[in-house]
Every structure is written in structure tokens, then in C-alpha cells.
């Protein structure tokens, strides 16, 4: 069975490396600050006890005050998983890109940019993927008008 | 002898921008459905003209070997492939060859949902087909947008972009239903005038 | 004297007989050798994730059918598992057995088309795919007995399945299970040692282990590269821990291994169906759930091993009758990220074959 690590298991380890990164830790996920997302993800991937080498998927959810990005990480070696979340501001949504760590994030980040409007800094080719260039608006937002 | 590599002319972003503009222009133009080509129905009622034997032979030859173009975006494609396979055979109607190039085809069975991004390309494929040509709209998505009609990126039916001759409902239509639609098209071809003058008027 | 050469960009466009669906590739070619490739999709983007926010939980099940339209039962199962996790609904035992039988039959049907179109792309123009469609029609007859539909079944419900198996289903399934292994042996006899298939696909389009894990590949693509990762064994859902089956794993990660893994998976699926049919119990097929399900506030991720990889649904609920957000983790989209690695240096004809061996479905990629 894949052991789903809770925020309480992993948050102390992250806090030891990056003292003010963790915003919230509950039994489902670990929420970190968006500026430190890349460093925390790199730490989670390269540390021997955690070794999250497989990025399962990235989702984005629009809560009316903020956007929340959900990263679902899996380790094939130890067969455990973790949910890593980050929040970003609705007016200027920007998050560091995870493409250099996990190449599977490439098309998923482009899709989130296309449909939600969150920019990923450091992405090599951030352009629309499902809709065409010149489309106005980001359809999956809650305030999108037809 | 040295080989000097030259960089290409257009960058990808420029091409994307041009394509996006084409899609927006087509969307602005296609807000009303194109009327169905039913001149053959009106002519018959008004003039009650009997078909000549030349017409009969030409119509028979046209309907007996309609070659479809491979155009299959979505789920209905697999019912079309199943119709062409060995259980429900399309080969007995002379249609087993699906032509990859639209210039060699005379029937387009649109089997799948149409999105605005794909619409200019469908128009281009339809324009590349040579006269006389027919279109069968297969499935609910092709007739009216189907289960996705309220979505932001779906064209509500192929008849916004190209004129459609036969509509086959279903989601997806069974192979028997598609064969019935093809027989209806055969009947339509049998009753139409193969007069070249009339065909030019009919297309416009 | 210098010879000017220019790598030219050719568009292998959305309407093409061997791109599986509306998929477009802007390939940069140097002569006949592929230098770079940019995949462009979105031609079938129907906005399913946005439509989820306006339909009820049960009303969304027909839309999930149309994601990977070649394996509708698996899509239904993944979505229904996610809703059951969210709403904490238990499923009766007979329904679990029926779900396993349907999911494994669907895996066989989907792999038949995958292998058939792979061989179609390799040059055996229509013969293998017509043979495999003949087998697939037998499976579609079984599905039609159960749900009334041939392609998009809408059969699973939250808390079970929509209706019980009719009486003639189990004898027909017996009949099918007797004949199918002989057909797979027939294909093996024709194809496994075939010189043309070996020359065209051995060593072509190699994807090594580290790259496969890094690009989040899944399903047969990941297993052919040597990683033994199958959700049915790593994180068992439903009642898969009661059955005995193997996970075929390849060694090289080339096209031949991906083809071989799919054929072996078909055999293992038949094994699972035999065991499920022997152990099936009687009882209700759907547990009592309200007509309009209102799960409590929260989120859940339900995932299964679909024929093409790991299919998952991430659902967020705010205690209303429609999901607040539904995100679909599509296996074909992630498998496609590996395409650029696999085709550098090969020719155009190999590009078509390598692309066919990944086995994508556009309904999933674009959603």
C-alpha cells in the first residue's frame, strides 16, 4: 500500500532546512510559501529518506481570495506519497516552475497557465496549450464570463 | 565541401499568433448556421422533372463508390472504424477505401466534436475536396454540439462551418445507424440532378 | 564551396491517417532525420473540467466516458472511486467483483486496439487491426448485454453499478474466456518472431528508466522501461489484493518491449477475470446513496490503473450537489512528454511507429 505521508511527518524536516517555509501542516498536506516552493521541492526530491522522484500531477484550484496549487509527489523506491500545496495571490499569480526537477511538469504547467492564468517563472516555453494564441481570458477561473 | 546550417524564417510564436487570428476571425463569421443544401427537394416538387437515363447512370456511378476522407476527431471514429471492419462491412457499398488526402475523396463523415481551434482546418479540408462532395454529420456532437454544447470552446454543430447533407443521431450512433444514414445519402444522390450547371448553383 | 542546408519545418497536421486522433506535430527535419519536434494539441479541448462544475456528481459520469473513449469502464471506475472516497460510501461485494470483471475486460479491449494500430503503423496495413476488431466485437457484445451501449457505457454509479448482470452474461463470458487465449496465441505465432516487426521495432525509440520516471510516464510505457510500478499492486484499490497476477516488465524500453508488455497484460487480465468469475458472490449491486449526493467539505484523489497508465480524479467539494473543482490526471498527456526524447535522431517513418507505440487517446489529452 502506498503510505500517504501526512503534513505532520514531513513538516519538521522541512522546517529544519528552511525555517519559515511551512505555512500550514495538516493531516492531508503541507502548505509552503510560494517563493520557497522550488527549494523545498528540490530538498524533497534529493533527500535520501524522502526521495520523491515521481511527480504524479499538478492541479490548481480557484478559491475566491487566492489560487492554490496542489503537487502530488510519489516515491517509487519507498512507495510513499505526499501532497505539497502552495498559495498565491489572485491579482498577480506567479509561482516558480518545477520543470527543471520533474520534466513531467512541462505540459501541466502550460495548461494551468492557459486555463487559470498562473504564470510559472522559469518555464522554457510558457504559452497556451489547449486554447489558441490570442484567446481572451482564462476559462477555469470562477469569474470567467462567456 | 562545408555545410552551412541556416536558421528557419518563422519562429513558432509568430505562426501561433497567425493561427490564433484565423480562428478568431472564423468564429466571428460563423454565428449563424449555414442553410442545408435542399435545392434537390424544392426542384422536384416545383418542376416535377423526370430524370433522364444519363442522370440515372451518373447518379448510380456516383453513389456506388463514395470514398470517405479520414476525418475522425473523437469517439464516433471508433464506430466508423467498426463499420468499416469485418462485422458491419462498408466494402459492400464500395466504400472500403478511406482516402487520406481529401483531394481524392468525395464524402466527409464528420465523426467527432468540433472545437473552434479545429474549425479553420475543417473548412480547409472541405474546400480541398473536389465537386461533387457530400457531408454526413455523425453523432450528437456533429449535429448540435451534443453533450458539450454549453462549453466555451465547442462549435454547436458542423453546419456552422460547412453545409451538411445527412444527419445521423446517436452518441455514438451504432454501426447500423451509420449504414442507414449512408443509405439515405444514396437515395439523395439518386434523386438529384447531375446537371453541372445546377451543381455550381447548388454549392454557392 | 559551401553547401547550404536548412533544417525545414514540416507540419504533420491534425488530419492525418496515422496520428491517433487530432494531434499535430511541428517537426524540424534535416533531410529525413528528425531533429526536433513540437507537439501541438488542443484541437479536441471540450472544457470537461469546467462542465464538471455545473453537473451533479452522478450527472458527470457520462462525461467521464468520453475522456478516453476506448476504455470507458475504467474512466467511470476512477471517477466513482474518487467520489466514494470523498463521500465515504461503501460498496457491496458483488458490485466489487462486477467492477473488476468489467475493468479487466476493458483492458483487453483497449490493448487490442493499441496493438492493432501499432501494427498498422508498422506497415501491416489493415490485417492485424481487422483481426483484433473481430475479437473486440465479442467483448463489446458482452458490454452491450450489461449496459446497452457499445462504446460509452455509463455503467458505474456511486456506491456500485447501475444494474445487475443479466442471466446470459456469465455463460457468454465462459465462452469468451475459452476462446480468447487461443486467439492471443494465434497473434503471437504470427507476430512474435516476425522479422519485419523485429527489425522495425527492436532498439527503436528507447526510453531509459530515469527519464521515464522523471517525465511521470505510466502504464505500459513505464513498465517497458524496466520500472515495476502498477497501481493494482502498489496501491491496491477495490478488491485487487484478492487476486493473483503478474506484472510484465520489459528490459530495454524500446517499441518492441511496449508491444510485448501489452500482449502479456492481456493474458494476465484474462487470468484475473477467471478468478473473479469463480469467486463472485450474490447480493445487492448498489448501496443506498441519496439521489443527489452532497459530500462533506474536503478533497479526495482516486486513481486506478487504466489501460494507458494511471488515471486519477482530484475532486474538491464544498458540500453542494456539484463538484467545486474536478481535475483529471490524464495518463496520455504525461506519456507524451517523453516523445521528444524518444525520437531524436530517428527518421520520419520511425517517428510514426514510436508515436504509435506510446498509445495515446486525444480525448484524454485535451479533455
Image: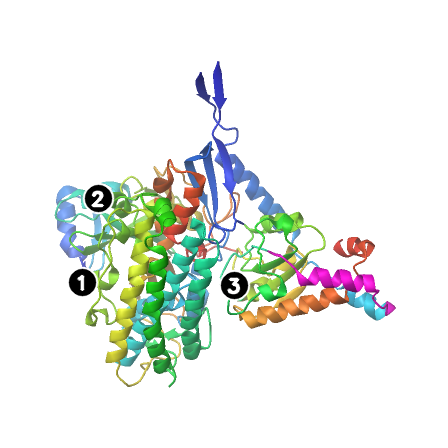
The alpha-carbon separation of the residues under discs 2 and 3 comes to 46 Å
Q: Is residue B37 left or right of residue C209?
A: right
**Which of the image's four quarters has the C terminus of chain A?**
bottom right
- In this rendering, which labeled residue sits more in front, label 2 or label 3? 3
Give the residues drawn in magenta, as a range.
B47-68
Where in the figure is residue C141, as x and y percent of width and height?
A: 44, 75
Q: Considering depth in this image, is A140 or C349 the residue closer to the camera?
A: C349
* Viewer-nearest residue: B10 or A140: B10
Q: Position of residue C354 (x, y in %)?
A: 38, 46
- Please give the label number shown on residue B76: 3
How did the renderer colour the structure? rainbow
Give the x, y percent position of residue B111. 55, 61
Q: Chain of mark 1?
A: A
| Chain ID of residue with mark 3 | B
* Above or below: residue B134 compared with residue C280: above
Report whether B190 appears left or right of C206: right
Q: Residue at x 17, y 47 (%)?
A: A51
Classify mark 1: helix, strand or loop. loop
| Residue B31 in picture, x, y percent from top left | 65, 55
> Can residue C137 be seen at all in this image of the molecule?
yes
- Based on the picture, tell me whether residue C118 belongs to the magenta stretch: no
Reply above or below: C323 against B122: below
Q: Is residue A58 visible?
A: no
Q: Identify the secondary structure beneath mark 3.
A: helix
In 3D space, how far apart are the residues under numbered discs 3 and 1 (Cα atoms)?
A: 38 Å
Q: Is residue A74 left or right of residue C33?
A: left
First-in-chain label (1 vs 2):
1
Q: Which residue is mark 2?
A: A40
Q: Which residue is mark 1?
A: A1
Amino acid at each position: 500500500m502506498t503510505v500517504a505521508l501526512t503534513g505532520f511527518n514531513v513538516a519538521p524536516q522541512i522546517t529544519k532546512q528552511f525555517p519559515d517555509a511551512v505555512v500550514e501542516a495538516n493531516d492531508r498536506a503541507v502548505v509552503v510559501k510560494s517563493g520557497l516552493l522550488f527549494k523545498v521541492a528540490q530538498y524533497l526530491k534529493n533527500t535520501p529518506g524522502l526521495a520523491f522522484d515521481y511527480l504524479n500531477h499538478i492541479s490548481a484550484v480557484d478559491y475566491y481570495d487566492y489560487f492554490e496549487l496542489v503537487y502530488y509527489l510519489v516515491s517509487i523506491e519507498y512507495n510513499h506519497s505526499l501532497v505539497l500545496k502552495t498559495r498565491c495571490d489572485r491579482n498577480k499569480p506567479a509561482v516558480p516552475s518545477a520543470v527543471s526537477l520533474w520534466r513531467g511538469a512541462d505540459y501541466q504547467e502550460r495548461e494551468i497557465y492557459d486555463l487559470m492564468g498562473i504564470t510559472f517563472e522559469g518555464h522554457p516555453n510558457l504559452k497556451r496549450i489547449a486554447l489558441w494564441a490570442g484567446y481572451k481570458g482564462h476559462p477555469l477561473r470562477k469569474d470567467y464570463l462567456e | 565541401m562545408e555545410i552551412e546550417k541556416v536558421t528557419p524564417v518563422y519562429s513558432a510564436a509568430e505562426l501561433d499568433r497567425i493561427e490564433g487570428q484565423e480562428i478568431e476571425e472564423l468564429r466571428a463569421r460563423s454565428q449563424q448556421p449555414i442553410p442545408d443544401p435542399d435545392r434537390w427537394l424544392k426542384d422536384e416538387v416545383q418542376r416535377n422533372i423526370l430524370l433522364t437515363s444519363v442522370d440515372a447512370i451518373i447518379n448510380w456511378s456516383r453513389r456506388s463508390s463514395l470514398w470517405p476522407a479520414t476525418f475522425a476527431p473523437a469517439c464516433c471514429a471508433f464506430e466508423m472504424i467498426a463499420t468499416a471492419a469485418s462485422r458491419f462491412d462498408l466494402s459492400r457499398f464500395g466504400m472500403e477505401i478511406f482516402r487520406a488526402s481529401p483531394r481524392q475523396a468525395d464524402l466527409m463523415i464528420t465523426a467527432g466534436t468540433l472545437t473552434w481551434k479545429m474549425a479553420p482546418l475543417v473548412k480547409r479540408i472541405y474546400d480541398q475536396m473536389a465537386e461533387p462532395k457530400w457531408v454526413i454529420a455523425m453523432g450528437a456532437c456533429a449535429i448540435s454540439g451534443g453533450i458539450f454544447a454549453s462549453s466555451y470552446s465547442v462549435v454547436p454543430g458542423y453546419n456552422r462551418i460547412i453545409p451538411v447533407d445527412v444527419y445521423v443521431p446517436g452518441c455514438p450512433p451504432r454501426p447500423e445507424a451509420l449504414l442507414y444514414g449512408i443509405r439515405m445519402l444514396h437515395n439523395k444522390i439518386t434523386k438529384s440532378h447531375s446537371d453541372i450547371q445546377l451543381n455550381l448553383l447548388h454549392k454557392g | 564551396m559551401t553547401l547550404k542546408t536548412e533544417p525545414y519545418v514540416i507540419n504533420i497536421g491534425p488530419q492525418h491517417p496515422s496520428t491517433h486522433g487530432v494531434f499535430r506535430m511541428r517537426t524540424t527535419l534535416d533531410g529525413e532525420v528528425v531533429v526536433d519536434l513540437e507537439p501541438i494539441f488542443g484541437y479536441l479541448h471540450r472544457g470537461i473540467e469546467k462542465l464538471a462544475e455545473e453537473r451533479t456528481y452522478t450527472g458527470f459520469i457520462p462525461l467521464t466516458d468520453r475522456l478516453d473513449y476506448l476504455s470507458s469502464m475504467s474512466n467511470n471506475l476512477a471517477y466513482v472511486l474518487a467520489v466514494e472516497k470523498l463521500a465515504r460510501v461503501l460498496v457491496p461485494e458483488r458490485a466489487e467483483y462486477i467492477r473488476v470483471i468489467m475493468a479487466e475486460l476493458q483492458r483487453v479491449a483497449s490493448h487490442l486496439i493499441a496493438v492493432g494500430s501499432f501494427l498498422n503503423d508498422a506497415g501491416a496495413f489493415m490485417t492485424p487491426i481487422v483481426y483484433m476488431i473481430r475479437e473486440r466485437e465479442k467483448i463489446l457484445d458482452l458490454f452491450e448485454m450489461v449496459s446497452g451501449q457499445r462504446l460509452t457505457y455509463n455503467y458505474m454509479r456511486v456506491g456500485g453499478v447501475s444494474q445487475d448482470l443479466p442471466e446470459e452474461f456469465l455463460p457468454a463470458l465462459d465462452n469468451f474466456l475459452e476462446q480468447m487465449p487461443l486467439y492471443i496465441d494465434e497473434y503471437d505465432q504470427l507476430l512474435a518472431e516476425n522479422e519485419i516487426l523485429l527489425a522495425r521495432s527492436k532498439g527503436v525509440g528507447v526510453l531509459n528508466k530515469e527519464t521515464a520516471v522523471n517525465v511521470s510516464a505510466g502504464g505500459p510505457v513505464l513498465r517497458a522501461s524496466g520500472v515495476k510500478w502498477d497501481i493494482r499492486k502498489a496501491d491496491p484499490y477495490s478488491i485487487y489484493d484478492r487476486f493473483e497476477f503478474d506484472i510484465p516488465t520489459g528490459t530495454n524500453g524500446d517499441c518492441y518491449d511496449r508491444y510485448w508488455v501489452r500482449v502479456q497484460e492481456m493474458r494476465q487480465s484474462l487470468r484475473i477475470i477467471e478468478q473473479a468469475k469463480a469467486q463472485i458472490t450474490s447480493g445487492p449491486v448498489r448501496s443506498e446513496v441519496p439521489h443527489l449526493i452532497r459530500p462533506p467539505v474536503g478533497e479526495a484523489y482516486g486513481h486506478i490503473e487504466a489501460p494507458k497508465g494511471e488515471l486519477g480524479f482530484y475532486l474538491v467539494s464544498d458540500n453542494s450537489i456539484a463538484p467545486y473543482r474536478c481535475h483529471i490526471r490524464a495518463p496520455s498527456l504525461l506519456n507524451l512528454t517523453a516523445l521528444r526524447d524518444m525520437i531524436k535522431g530517428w527518421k520520419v517513418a520511425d517517428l510514426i511507429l514510436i508515436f504509435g507505440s506510446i498509445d495515446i487517446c486525444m480525448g484524454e489529452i485535451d479533455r
